[in-house]
Structures are given as C-alpha cells and as structure tokens.
Amino acid sequence: MVFCSPRTPRGSDHVNRQKSGFTLVELLVVIAIIGVLVGLLLPAVQAAREAARRMSCSNNLKQIGLALHNYHDIHNALPPARVRDRNCGADSWVTSNIGWQARILPQMEQSPIFDQIDFRIYPGWGGVNAAVRDIELPAYRCPSDPGKGNLVWVDPGGVRRTGPNPNGVYGTNNYAACVGHDTRLRESTNLGLVRGWAMALMPSCTDRSGRGNVGFRDFLDGTSNTLLVSEILIGHPSINTNSDYENSPDLVTQDDNGCNATNYLSGATERATGNSWFRGYFAWEMTFTSLMTPNSRLPSCGANTERVLFASRSLHPGGVQSAMGDGSVRFFSETIDWNTWRFLGGTKDGVAVQVDN
C-alpha cells in the first residue's frame, strides 16, 4: 500500500523563506538600538579611561611629594628651582640652570640617570648631559596630556589660540613647583612664598651642592595647606611678553593679571611650557604661580627667564591635582575661590588657608 504525503501548496517555500529572515525595517531597528547602546557606553568607557589616567597622575604627584620629603631628610632643605652661577666665568648667565626635578632623581628611584648628570654644565650644551636630557620619564608626565603641544585654548576675547610644541631636545614635563602668589622666580622674598624654589646663588664658584634656602620648618602656615607641586600642560598657549605687573604682584587680581599683549608663541620652541624636566632656564618650564587659579581663563605670559605668571593647568575635567607640603595629593576645582588658591601658595604669609578634602 502506497501512502502519499499531502501536496505542499504552491509558493509555500517562498513564504517560509520570507518568514525566516529580517525585514529591512527590523534590521534598521536593530542598527538603531546598537547605535544608541554604543552612544550610551562610549562616554562611560571614556570616563573610565580618564579616571585611570587621573589616578596614574595622582600617583606621580604622590611619588614626587614623597621624593621631596626624602630629599629634605637628606639635605635638611628643599631643592632650589635652579642654580645659576652668574658670578662665575664668561658664560655665567647660563651656567647650570638644571631644574629641581633632576636633583630629586635618586629619591624617584632614578639614580642611574642622576649619576650621569654633570650639574656644572648648562643643559643646552650637551656633553655628558646630552645622554639624559631627552629622556622621557613617565613619573614626570601626566597620561592625560598627549605632550605634543599645539593645544587649542579660547582667550578672554573669544579668540581661539593654538599653543607651541616643545623643541624636541628635552624630555617634557607636566609637574611644576609653586612659587606662591608672586610674578617672578626670586632668589629671596618677603612675600611669604615658597622661596626654596627660587634660584640659588652658589656660595662659591666651586660649590655645586645646589641646596635650596628653605625647608619644611619655614612652612609656618602649615604643610597640609600649602601647595608644593601641581600640574602644567605641555605647550599651552602663552604670551611671549612680561606682565604689566611683573614687579607688582599685589596689583594682580582674579580678573586682571597684566598679560595684555597678543604675541602668542607658536611653532617648535624651547619656550613652550613644560618643555623640559631637566632644564630650568625658563621659570615656566618647571614652576607656576598661585596668582592664577587652576585652568585660569586669563592668559599666561612671560618673556624673561624668571617671570612666572603661568597657571597650573591640566586636561582633567574641572580642575588640577596638586601635591601638598605634607605629601598628600588633592584635586582642586577650577572654580576655587581666587584668594583661597592665592594664599595656598604661601608658606608663611600669615593666611593659613584650610581646604577640606
């Protein structure tokens, strides 16, 4: 007996194939959903990456703060911002000028690099120092800053300014020492600033000790509420002219720092902020002023080597990180009160500013 299966209606295969696939509308809906999910997740991923970079930067500042304390334990003083033997020899004006970060290398676990440095030779001359001056040290670099310069910034007049880029001879630097509420990097001062960062004249032309003239004993306003080191951006736009208030820091206000010219630096230049951790010839390579709040909307400016109307700046959203005199690291909002930030820079100005975590 033969059984025959029911005859399949004509065209049913075609119908079944249509039902097993996606329609164009369904496909577009799926793509739209995926796009929405990516749009929601991408900011979270970027935020997580920035959080990791910020933590790494905080660890760098913590290491620098501890290194300064260890240096102080050995020398009973903080390192000078730079040492200039301007009374020694025909080339005295540029003699040495090696920056403070080079002096704490042993405390940063970089003794092999430190041992190669001849502190009697100007950084730009090369020689034995040429082997170390261009080394990029991760501990002196914030991972949020690409370090290539050419940063774009909108000035108070609404004009977009593009900063310079480093000249490429030196390893770049994102961390600067605080000179307090001053317009210049001074050898001595009565303003109650961090004088230990000022350039120190040597007792004699053969003395290469390079110790600073201030220790933590001079932090009369309290180490926990005194700025020590903060962030700077490599190649941020700056004006190549001194402030109108270069000799009058008390005239600087939160809305006017006297940087009124418009000849912004451009191209590859050794004058770029953060150009070097090794060299301290220009003050803004390794110092900042507390006369300008973090990520200030005012321009930074300076032409002479000791002018320092340069703000602490970072690419962290909303502010900068700073190492304090007690070795702690804090995040400061760019909206911080100007007077609070100003007096945080002084060691013994008689205004003991307290900042809550």
Image (spheres, grey):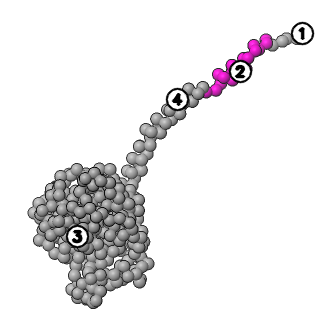
Q: Which of pointers 1 and 4 indicates the residue nearer the eye?
A: 4
**Residue situated in front as seen by the camera: 299 or 353:** 299
Q: Residue at x 29, y 58 (%)?
A: 313
Describe residue 69's horizontal placement relative to residue 117 as left or right: left
- Residue 263 lies in quadrant: bottom left
Q: CA distance from mark 3 to mark 2?
A: 82 Å
Proximity of marks 1 and 4: CB atoms separated by less than 8 Å: no
Q: CA distance from mark 1 to mark 4?
A: 53 Å
For this orientation, the residue located farthest to the top is 1
- The crowding category of the residue bearing disc 4, from other C-alpha atoms within 10 Å (few below 14, some 14 to 19, many at least 20), is few
Mark nearer the N terminus (3 vs 2): 2
Helix, strand or loop for disc 1 = loop
- The crowding category of the residue bearing disc 3, from other C-alpha atoms within 10 Å (few below 14, some 14 to 19, many at least 20), is many
Query: Looking at numbered disc 4 in the image, what kind of residue is underneath it?
Result: Val
Which residue corresponds to mark 3?
A: 307
Which residue corresponds to mark 2?
A: 14
Q: CA distance from mark 2 to mark 4?
A: 24 Å
Which residue corresponds to mark 1?
A: 1
Q: Position of residue 261 (x, y in %)?
A: 23, 63
Q: Which residues are magenta?
A: 6-22
Query: Looking at numbered disc 1 in the image, what kind of residue is underneath it?
Result: Met
Count of numbered circles in the view: 4
Query: Looking at numbered disc 2 in the image, what kind of residue is underneath it?
Result: His
